[in-house]
Image: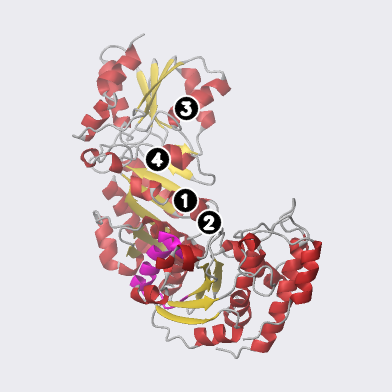
Amino acid sequence: MRNTFANVFYEEAKKDARLCVVVADISPAGSMEKLRKEYPDRFINTGVAEQIMIGMCAGMAMRGLRPFAYTIATFALFRPYEFIRDDLCYQGLPVTVVGVGGGVTYSTLGGTHHAMEDVALACSLPNMRVIAPCDPAEATAATQWCVAQQEGPVYLRLGKAGEPVITQDAAPFELGKVRLIREGRDALVLGYGPTLKMGVAAAMALEAKGISVAVASVHTLKPLDRDGIAKLLQRFPRVVVLEEMVPHGGLSGMVKEVAWESGARCRIECMTLKDEFLHVYGSHADLLGAHGFSLPALLRLLSEG
Amino acid sequence: MAAFDAAAARQRCLKYRKRILDVSQRVGALHIAPAFSCLEMTDTVYHGLLRPGRDAFVMSKGHGCVSQYVILEDLGIMPTAEIERYCTPGGLLGAHPDRGTPGVEASTGSLGHGMGLGVGMAYAEKLKATDARIYVVLSDGELQEGSSWEAAMMAANLGVSNLVAMVDLNDFGGMHKMSEYHTAFYPLREKFEAFGWECAEVNGHDAGAIHAAVAARKGERPFALLCRTVKGRGVSYMENVAIWHYRSPNKDEYAQALRELREISA
């Protein structure tokens, strides 16, 4: 997903000289290296200094450029949060903040590198749009949207590498519209980001048992497609929200709000990260498992009770 | 750079101080003292340095913005009706500047942001190959923010020689004198020079000296002008008295202030 972003951005940057990337001491992946070599003036590394990464992007946007701030999600959002709020959101500047490795993607690096609360923090900011694509194809469309838009700031939450494509049968990406990526009848998985592949895996596993599970990508967390979600909630008796984020402030709570406001009658379960800092190391899947976020757990939520 | 009439600046700044005092009589509180300390700096930017449509100005010490407002009013950019509605319902202007109000480039108020904005703006102009210059007025207090130094280091890394930062060196934070409570803040000039900036120091209430120092810079690196000022300059009971950071004078104090105000000579 990281390389996909870099490839798309590089291709767009060749066509639009206003596009720049400002990183904070992160090694350029894939095509980002090509961008750095071919357009060295438009690849800026502030070093280990995230406040100036955001401040600079704001100043550049004020003078007509289209900068993207890019680093590991914790450092892209948490460290310079007030700069994102005041410089980008308050002033409505078209800057995309790219957070690589949302959730517990950087599993072996410990809690300082886990962006477990990023969606909640980003969604709370007025003027901010929040996008978390679920696979490289969706990341391509999301990046193209970010490059083209001029209205204001965006937080683009990416995974890292190796995510499979799971949206091959879906309708085209449209910002702010929930996207059904697999049809179903008995239950619905709503989620975002790379862990949505677990929803697809669950749907495939349950298909053999005669349970038909739909999967939808809520790639845009803000503005949330409340109408689209309300319509989906009417169609299914059972809904599971799959969210690699702390339990509060994200999609889980927003889906329940929509359910309450729209009078939905479905049962809603949520599988999220725990509201805890876990001192656990291992693969991404190991970390998710320690949080109780696993395929067996999802299968239980979809088929029991 | 065009000639700058320092005598005319002294007359303008007397007028602006009186206008700021006028505004203070319609609101409960106003950042008079920090506006008086940076007034000559702001006046020099608008009347001597800024080329409309090309250059940009960021009031990084947002609490000094009433100095900016009265100058923008005098230039016919800020409607007088907005000055009259300062900090009241229906008005555009608050105690810190907002991007989008007439003549205001950046929203500030939270300190330590303006230097970063200025670096980004200056770098953008370099990329676009224009000759635009970016002027930033900073407080000395906001140089306690690490973000200001992240930006200062980056400015030198990027070689943004089109960036001019003026520091209002009134020696006051909101509470204390830097020279008494934060002694390691000084020396400042050497800090900027160590960060790769060209630096000069002037009397910050001498608009002619400010203009001359900016004009005389070599222009190969970002330029910091340390402007020695007095917080509340021009009114005896406000000078270096912390409470006037954010207070409006009562009627008697207002009358006394008007009686005292004179052109400030270098």
Q: Label 4, label 1: how many angstroms apart (C-alpha)?
A: 14 Å
* Circles 2 and 3 on the same subunit: no
Mark 1 neighbour density, 10 Å: few (under 14) some (14–19) many (20 or more): some
Q: Position of residue A126 (x, y in %)?
A: 54, 44
The residue identified by callout 3 is A253
The residue identified by callout 1 is A82
The residue identified by callout 4 is A118
In the depicted structure, whether residue A122 falls above or below residue B10: above
Q: Nearer the viewer, mark 4 or mark 1?
A: 1
Q: Given the image, what chain letter belongs to the residue carrying mark 1?
A: A
- The numbered mark, 1 or 3, whose residue comes first in the sequence reads 1
Question: Which region of the structure is painted magenta?
Answer: B143-164
Q: Nearer the viewer, residue B259 or A204?
A: B259
Residue type marked 1: Glu
Q: Residue furthest top?
A: A305
Disc 2 to disc 1: CB gap under 8 Å: yes
Residue at point 39% right, 83% down? B220
Residue type marked 2: Ser
Q: Label 2, label 4: how many angstroms apart (C-alpha)?
A: 23 Å
- The numbered mark, 4 or 1, whose residue comes first in the sequence reads 1
Q: Residue furthest bottom?
A: B3
